[in-house]
Image (cartoon, rainbow, N blue to C red):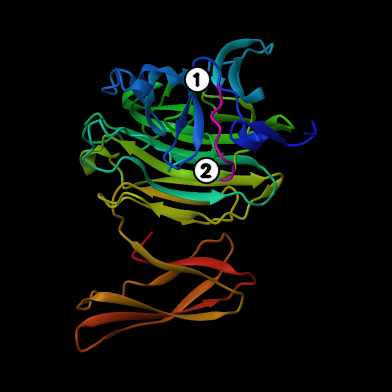
C-alpha cells in the first residue's frame, strides 16, 4: 500500500485514516444516542457505580448533568488549547498547566446541542420540561467564519419561588463537539452558584466529554450584560476564540486550535422547574443589540425558532434579524399579551392576500392586526382587514399586505401589542 494513501489496514479491512483512532490508557469508547462513537475518560460512572444524585458525582452544566470530574475551571490568565486532539490548559508562557485528555470525535456539520442534552433516567424526573426550553438558531453557511457574536440583556428579577431550579440564559455558538457561551445563571451548577444570579463563560460538551468554565461572578437584577464571542485567530491547527462578559473581570474563557464554531443561538435552558413561578418574575428577557458578523461583514441572519417546552407559555420571538446592533430575540417565560401566526417574505412593490382560519366557534374580534417586519429597514402596510363567520360559527380572518419599500422583507403576522 502506498504510504501517501489516505487508507490504512485494520482487522476489519481498509479504512480511511480519519476513521482510525488510538485509545490510550484510562480512556474508553462510548456509542452515543445518535449511533456515533466518542472517546471519553474512564470513570466510576461508566460502570454504573456511585452516580445517584447531583449532590454526589454528577453536577449540572449548560448541557445537563455529567460526572464532576469532567467539569473544570479555567483560571484567569490561562487558555484552553485543543492542539493535537487533546484539551490542555496553558499558562501565558504556553506551559501545560493541566492535560484534560483526548477530545471526543464526532462527525462535523451537526451542532451538538440540544440533541446531546443529558439527564439520566435514574435521576429524579422534573415536573416540567428539562434542558433547552425555547431558543432561536442560525447556522453560518456563508463560507466565512463568524468573527463576532455579541448580545445585550438585562438581568431579570429573581424567581418568586425556589425549588432548587437552575436557569441558564445565553447566546452561544457551537461546533459538532462543543458549545461556547457567555451564560447568565440562577441556581447551582458545576461552576458554583445558588439562589442568586451569576455569570460565567463556558465551553461545554454533552454527557460524553469535558466541560470548562471561567470564574463565576455574582450579578444583580437590573444589571446590563453584554456577552461577546470573538474570533481571535485561524490557522491549519484550528480556530481560536475569546468569550467574556464585557466589563466583568475574570469571565473571559479563551480557547485556541479548536473546530470552527458555526451554529449560533439565543437560548433559555432550565432544570428542576416545578411550577411556572420558578421562572424569573418577569414576562420575558429581551436579548437585544445582537451583533453577528462573518469576517468584516454583518451577517444576514434569519433565526429559526424552536419552542420545545410550552407548559407555562414559554416561547421565543425575534425582530430586526438583519440589523447589526439592533437585532432582538425575546425569550418569554410565560404567555405574552400578543401572539404570532404565519410568516413569509414579500418583494418590493408586491401585495399579498392572506387568510387565517380561527378554527373555533364564535367571534373573538379582529386579532390579526398587523404584519410586523423582521428587517431593520422596511415599509409594510396592512390593509383590508376583515373577517367572516360561517353558518357553523367558524371564523376566518382576511388581510392584504403591501411592501412599499425598495427591498424584499421578511415578516410575521401578530395580534395584540408587542
Local SS, label 1: strand
Location of residue 267 by image quarter: top left
Secondary structure beneath disc 2? loop
Question: Main SS of the magenta segment?
Answer: loop
Whether 130 is among the magenta residues is no
- Which residue has dot 1 on it? 27
For the N terminus, the image quarter is: top right
Q: Left or right: where does residue 393 sit relative to residue 141?
A: left
- The local crowd at label 1, few if under 14, some if 14 to 19, many if 20 or more residues have their Cα within 10 Å, is some
Tell me the quarter of the picture where residue 371 sits: bottom left
Q: Quadrant of the C terminus?
A: bottom left
Q: Is residue 43 above or below residue 407?
A: above
Residue at the extreme bottom: 391
Residue segment shown in magenta: 102-109
Q: Is residue 365 visible?
A: no
Residue to which mark 2 is pinned:
111
In the image, residue 375 sits, relative to residue 168, either above or below, namely: below
Q: Nearer the viewer, residue 257 or 274?
A: 257
Q: Name the residue at 34% across, 62% down.
A: 339
Amino acid at each position: 500500500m502506498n504510504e501517501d494513501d489516505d487508507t490504512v489496514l485494520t482487522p476489519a479491512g481498509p479504512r480511511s485514516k480519519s476513521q482510525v483512532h488510538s485509545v490510550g490508557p484510562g480512556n474508553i469508547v462510548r456509542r452515543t444516542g445518535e449511533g456515533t462513537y466518542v472517546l471519553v475518560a474512564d470513570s466510576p460512572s461508566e460502570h454504573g457505580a456511585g452516580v445517584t444524585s447531583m449532590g454526589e458525582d454528577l453536577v449540572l452544566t449548560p448541557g445537563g448533568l455529567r460526572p464532576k470530574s469532567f467539569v473544570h475551571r479555567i483560571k484567569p490568565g490561562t487558555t484552553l488549547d485543543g492542539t493535537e486532539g487533546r484539551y490542555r490548559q496553558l499558562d501565558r508562557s504556553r506551559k501545560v498547566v493541566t492535560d484534560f485528555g483526548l477530545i471526543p470525535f464526532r462527525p462535523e456539520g451537526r451542532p451538538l446541542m440540544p440533541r446531546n442534552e443529558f439527564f439520566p433516567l435514574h435521576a429524579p424526573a422534573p415536573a416540567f420540561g428539562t434542558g433547552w426550553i425555547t431558543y432561536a438558531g442560525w447556522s453560518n453557511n456563508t463560507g466565512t467564519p463568524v468573527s463576532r457574536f455579541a448580545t445585550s440583556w438585562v438581568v431579570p428579577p429573581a424567581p418568586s419561588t425556589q425549588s432548587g431550579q437552575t436557569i441558564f440564559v445565553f447566546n452561544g455558538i457551537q461546533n459538532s463537539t462543543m458549545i461556547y457561551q457567555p451564560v447568565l445563571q440562577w441556581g447551582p451548577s458545576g461552576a458554583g452558584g445558588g439562589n442568586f444570579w451569576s455569570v460565567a463563560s463556558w465551553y461545554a460538551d454533552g454527557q460524553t466529554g469535558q466541560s470548562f468554565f471561567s470564574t463565576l461572578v455574582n450579578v444583580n437584577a437590573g444589571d446590563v450584560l453584554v456577552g461577546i464571542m470573538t474570533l481571535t485567530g485561524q490557522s491549519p491547527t484550528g480556530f481560536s476564540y475569546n468569550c467574556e462578559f464585557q466589563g466583568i473581570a475574570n469571565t473571559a474563557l479563551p480557547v485556541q486550535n479548536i473546530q470552527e464554531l458555526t451554529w449560533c443561538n439565543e437560548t433559555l435552558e432550565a432544570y428542576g422547574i416545578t411550577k411556572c413561578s420558578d421562572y424569573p418574575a418577569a414576562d420575558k428577557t429581551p436579548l437585544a443589540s445582537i451583533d453577528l458578523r462573518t469576517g468584516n461583514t454583518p451577517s444576514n441572519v434569519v433565526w429559526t425558532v424552536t419552542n420545545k417546552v410550552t407548559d407555562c407559555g414559554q416561547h421565543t420571538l425575534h425582530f430586526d434579524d438583519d440589523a447589526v446592533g439592533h437585532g432582538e430575540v425575546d425569550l418569554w417565560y410565560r404567555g405574552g399579551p400578543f401572539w404570532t401566526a404565519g410568516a413569509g417574505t414579500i418583494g418590493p412593490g408586491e401585495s399579498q392576500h392572506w387568510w387565517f382560519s380561527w378554527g373555533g366557534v364564535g367571534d373573538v374580534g379582529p386579532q390579526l392586526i398587523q404584519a410586523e417586519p423582521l428587517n431593520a429597514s422596511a415599509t409594510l402596510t396592512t390593509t383590508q382587514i376583515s373577517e367572516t363567520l360561517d353558518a357553523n360559527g367558524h371564523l376566518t380572518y382576511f388581510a392584504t399586505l403591501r411592501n412599499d419599500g425598495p427591498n424584499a422583507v421578511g415578516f410575521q403576522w401578530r395580534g395584540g401589542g408587542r
